[in-house]
Image: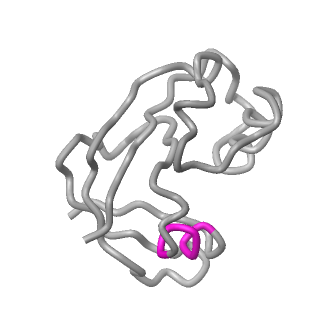
Protein backbone atom coordinates (compact mmCIF):
# COMPACT_ATOMS: atom_id res chain seq x y z
CA UNK A 1 0.00 0.00 0.00
CA UNK A 2 1.33 3.43 -0.93
CA UNK A 3 1.49 6.30 1.54
CA UNK A 4 0.82 10.01 1.32
CA UNK A 5 1.94 12.40 4.02
CA UNK A 6 -0.01 15.44 5.20
CA UNK A 7 0.71 18.09 7.82
CA UNK A 8 -1.38 17.75 10.99
CA UNK A 9 -3.80 20.57 10.13
CA UNK A 10 -4.44 19.03 6.70
CA UNK A 11 -5.07 15.59 8.21
CA UNK A 12 -7.86 17.17 10.28
CA UNK A 13 -9.40 18.67 7.12
CA UNK A 14 -9.28 15.23 5.48
CA UNK A 15 -11.00 13.52 8.42
CA UNK A 16 -13.66 16.27 8.43
CA UNK A 17 -14.30 15.68 4.70
CA UNK A 18 -13.18 19.20 3.75
CA UNK A 19 -10.01 18.10 1.92
CA UNK A 20 -10.60 15.45 -0.75
CA UNK A 21 -7.77 16.32 -3.13
CA UNK A 22 -4.03 16.85 -3.05
CA UNK A 23 -1.44 18.13 -5.48
CA UNK A 24 1.79 16.19 -5.90
CA UNK A 25 4.88 17.27 -7.79
CA UNK A 26 7.68 14.93 -8.90
CA UNK A 27 5.58 11.80 -8.19
CA UNK A 28 8.14 9.12 -7.26
CA UNK A 29 5.37 6.69 -6.20
CA UNK A 30 3.70 6.37 -9.61
CA UNK A 31 0.30 7.13 -8.08
CA UNK A 32 -2.58 5.75 -10.16
CA UNK A 33 -6.39 5.69 -10.03
CA UNK A 34 -7.45 2.77 -7.84
CA UNK A 35 -4.35 2.83 -5.63
CA UNK A 36 -5.10 2.26 -1.97
CA UNK A 37 -3.28 4.66 0.33
CA UNK A 38 -2.29 4.98 3.93
CA UNK A 39 -2.57 8.63 4.91
CA UNK A 40 0.18 9.62 7.32
CA UNK A 41 0.40 12.64 9.60
CA UNK A 42 3.86 13.98 8.74
CA UNK A 43 4.12 15.74 12.10
CA UNK A 44 3.90 12.55 14.19
CA UNK A 45 4.43 9.77 11.62
CA UNK A 46 1.15 8.03 12.44
CA UNK A 47 -1.36 6.65 9.94
CA UNK A 48 -4.61 8.57 10.43
CA UNK A 49 -6.77 7.02 7.68
CA UNK A 50 -6.89 4.96 4.50
CA UNK A 51 -8.10 6.16 1.12
CA UNK A 52 -8.43 5.17 -2.51
CA UNK A 53 -7.48 7.35 -5.47
CA UNK A 54 -10.60 8.08 -7.53
CA UNK A 55 -9.25 10.51 -10.13
CA UNK A 56 -5.98 12.03 -11.32
CA UNK A 57 -5.60 15.14 -13.47
CA UNK A 58 -2.27 16.01 -15.09
CA UNK A 59 -1.42 19.68 -15.67
CA UNK A 60 1.30 22.24 -15.13
CA UNK A 61 0.95 24.58 -12.18
CA UNK A 62 0.25 27.42 -14.60
CA UNK A 63 -2.76 25.51 -15.98
CA UNK A 64 -4.36 24.83 -12.58
CA UNK A 65 -7.71 26.60 -12.19
CA UNK A 66 -10.36 26.94 -9.48
CA UNK A 67 -12.21 23.79 -10.57
CA UNK A 68 -9.00 21.78 -10.13
CA UNK A 69 -8.84 23.04 -6.55
CA UNK A 70 -12.28 21.75 -5.48
CA UNK A 71 -11.64 19.78 -2.30
CA UNK A 72 -8.21 21.37 -1.97
CA UNK A 73 -7.04 24.49 -0.15
CA UNK A 74 -7.24 27.55 -2.36
CA UNK A 75 -4.78 30.36 -3.02
CA UNK A 76 -5.43 33.98 -3.99
CA UNK A 77 -3.32 33.70 -7.15
CA UNK A 78 -0.84 31.46 -8.95
CA UNK A 79 2.18 33.18 -7.40
CA UNK A 80 0.86 32.38 -3.92
CA UNK A 81 0.29 28.76 -5.00
CA UNK A 82 3.87 28.43 -6.28
CA UNK A 83 5.31 29.99 -3.10
CA UNK A 84 3.25 27.63 -0.93
CA UNK A 85 4.40 24.56 -2.88
CA UNK A 86 8.04 25.66 -2.67
CA UNK A 87 7.79 25.17 1.10
CA UNK A 88 7.20 21.45 0.49
CA UNK A 89 9.39 20.95 -2.57
CA UNK A 90 12.07 23.41 -3.67
CA UNK A 91 12.78 26.76 -5.25
CA UNK A 92 12.80 24.95 -8.61
CA UNK A 93 8.98 24.92 -8.58
CA UNK A 94 7.43 27.26 -11.15
CA UNK A 95 4.38 27.67 -13.35
CA UNK A 96 5.78 25.15 -15.86
CA UNK A 97 6.22 22.42 -13.21
CA UNK A 98 4.05 19.33 -13.90
CA UNK A 99 1.54 18.48 -11.17
CA UNK A 100 -0.75 15.54 -10.42
CA UNK A 101 -4.06 16.61 -8.91
CA UNK A 102 -5.20 13.58 -6.96
CA UNK A 103 -8.76 13.08 -5.77
CA UNK A 104 -9.38 10.46 -3.11
CA UNK A 105 -12.03 9.07 -0.82
CA UNK A 106 -11.59 7.56 2.62
CA UNK A 107 -12.48 3.95 3.39
Name the quadrant of the N terminus.
bottom left
| Residue 94 on image: x %, y % | 70, 23
| Residue 35 on image: x %, y % | 20, 52
Is residue 106 placed above or below 95 in the rendered structure? below
Q: Which residue is drawn at 68% across and 19% down?
A: 95
Name the quadrant of the C terminus.
bottom left
Q: Residue at x 55, y 72 (%)?
A: 42
User: Left or right: 10 with respect to 57?
Assistant: right
| Residue 100 on image: x %, y % | 44, 33
* Figure quadrant of residue 9: bottom right
* Figure quadrant of residue 93: top right
Judging depth in this view, the residue of 57 and 44 nearest the camera is 57
Q: Is residue 48 inside the magenta stretch?
A: no
| Residue 21 on image: x %, y % | 47, 49
User: Left or right: 33 with respect to 49?
Assistant: left
Q: Give the range drawn in magenta.
A: 10-15
- What's the image's color scheme? one colour
Looking at the rendered structure, the number of numbered marks drawn on it comes to 0
Judging depth in this view, the residue of 22 and 46 nearest the camera is 22
* Figure quadrant of residue 78: top right
Amino acid sequence: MKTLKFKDFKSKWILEGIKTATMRLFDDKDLQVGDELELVNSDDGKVFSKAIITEITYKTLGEVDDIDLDGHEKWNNKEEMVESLRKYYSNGVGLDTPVKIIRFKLF
